[in-house]
Structures are given as C-alpha cells and as structure tokens.
Amino acid sequence: MRSIEEIKKHYNWNEEDEKHLKQMKDIAIKHKDNFVNKLYEYFNIFEDKDRYLKDEKIKERHKAHLQAWFLELFEGNLDHLYISKAQRIGTRHVQIGLPPHYLNSSMNFVREFIESLVIEKTADANEKIKILKSIDKILDINLDIITEAYREEEFKTYLGTSKIQKIFIETIQGVSRSIDLFIVTIMSFLAIVGGGWILYEFVNLVLGRVSPESTALEILGSTLILYAISELLNEELKHLKGAPLSLKVFAGIALAAIIRKILIISLYPKKSIELLILGILMLFIGIVYFIINKVERR
C-alpha cells in the first residue's frame, strides 16, 4: 500500500481541501440518516444484495458503519488512521465476496448524493466548485485505497497456494475456458441452423406446400427453442466474461422443449395420456425454475 505522503502528493491534497470538507460537516450531520436510507434504496438494484446483507442485525451494523464513514469524509483528517480504516473496508469486502463492481457503482451514487448537497446548500458559485473538487478527491482516494486493498487480499490468497496447485488451477481454468468457447460455437451453429429451418418452413407455409395448422405450431415451437438457445448463448458469453452461470437458463430450455412437444402432440387426440404426462413434467420443471430463480436472487 502506498504511503500517506504519496497519496497526498498524487492527489494534490492540501489544507484547502481539508477546509472545504469541514465546511460541509454540519450539513453532512443533518443528512446522515437520509444518506444511509437513500443508499439502501440504491442497493435494491443489486438482485443478490441479500447474499451480503443477510439479516436485520447485519443491516443495522452495516448502516452504522456507513454513517460513520460518511461523516468521517467531512473531518478532513487524511492521516494513517483514516487510510487504515479504508484498507479494512476493502479487506472485509473481499472476505464476504462482494464484487468490486458493486463497490464502484455505489461510490458513484455516493458522489452524486454529496454533490447534490453541495450544489443545493452552497450559494457562492466559486466556493461550490472548490468544494466539489475536494469531494471528488476524497472519494477517489477512498476508492483507490479500497481497490488496492482488494487486489492485495486477492493476491495473498493466490500466493497462499503451492506452485503445483497454481499450475493445476491455471490448467483447469484454461480447459474450462476452452469448453466454454466450444459450447458458444456449438450454440451459435445451432442458432443459425434453427433460424434457417424456421425460415424454410415459413416459406413452405406461405407457398402452401404443407399443412397450415401443423406447420404453424411447429414453427412456433421451434421459435421457442431458438429463443432458449439464444438465452443460453447470452449466458455463456456472460460466463466467459467472469459472471457465474445461471442454472435457470437450462430449466428454461427444458420448458421450451416440452412446450414445443405439447404443441405438436396437441394435433393428435389419441395421444392424450402422453399429453398429460408432458403437462405434469412441465409443471414440475416450472416449479424447479421458480425455485432456482428465487435462490439466485438472494
């Protein structure tokens, strides 16, 4: 981690910045509760926020920490103790597995919240600009320190493994990535073939070469399958970029396949038992899809 002297030098931090922040201290105290409430409203955009804020006890403790951090921004005391607290924030976020994106986007919200206060409560235009610049500095310094703590903690974890373990992990990661690329290639090929087949059947339908009723249902069913393949392809692309793989996509594909089969069988009255079995199977997979979706949102 960089020294306090380096940080101040690189961000051109000076006594004027401390003074500007302290000017906003009284306003910050008045709006500390509103800050936490608004920030928690913002957290609702993260679908899996409950994975990190699991119960009311954790939420209350977290709110208290947020409020304390918010007020300390306006103390203007950029010293070793302040840097140490920011480092612990980064370390703790790594320990609970919080994605850095959540931290960065939340910091952007904090910046907008504070800047709106400065704009609203500061009358003098020149003073307003100076305070806003100091706000940007202290928030960027916080983000810099916390991000650095993220990297150091993750690097320590990596160094904790032996050389053989590292080679094994890197080899497995390479194989896994190759498999993902292969799946994406196959899915792309299937999507092209499926789209071509739908177009071919549609042309036959328009030209009157096939039965309108059965062909229309087959086209509808195949469109569902094509849509499911598209969703799986998008999910694989996200996975290649580092996102976790969602199981609900596979349940969705199974549902699409069963619906397609039901559409086709519905043309044959004698297959009512098979239709009933497929209906029960569709209900079962639908329940599984609902459960997976609910779990992944936590």
Image (spheres, rainbow, N blue to C red):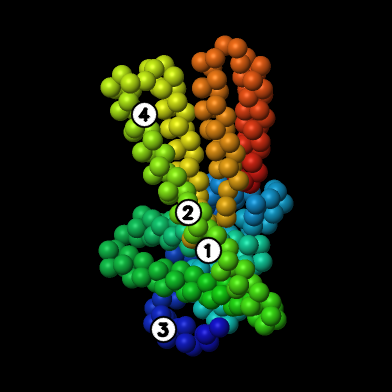
Question: Which tag, 1 or 3, sits closer to the chain's start?
Answer: 3
Residue 27 visible in image? no
Q: Which mark is residue 157?
A: none
Q: Nearer the viewer, mark 1 or mark 3?
A: 1
Is 27 situated above or below 187? below
Q: Which residue is mark 3?
A: 10
Residue 245 visible in image? yes
Question: Which tag, 3 or 4, sits closer to the chain's start?
Answer: 3
The alpha-carbon separation of the residues under discs 2 and 3 comes to 44 Å
CB of mark 1 within 8 Å of CB of mark 3? Answer: no
Task: Give the crowd class for mark 4: few <14, some 14-19, many >=20 residues within 10 Å.
Answer: some
The alpha-carbon separation of the residues under discs 4 and 1 comes to 35 Å
Residue at 39% from the left image edge and 17% from the top image edge: 211
- Horizontally, residue 7 falls left or right of residue 116, namely right
Q: Which residue is mark 4?
A: 201
The alpha-carbon separation of the residues under discs 2 and 1 comes to 10 Å
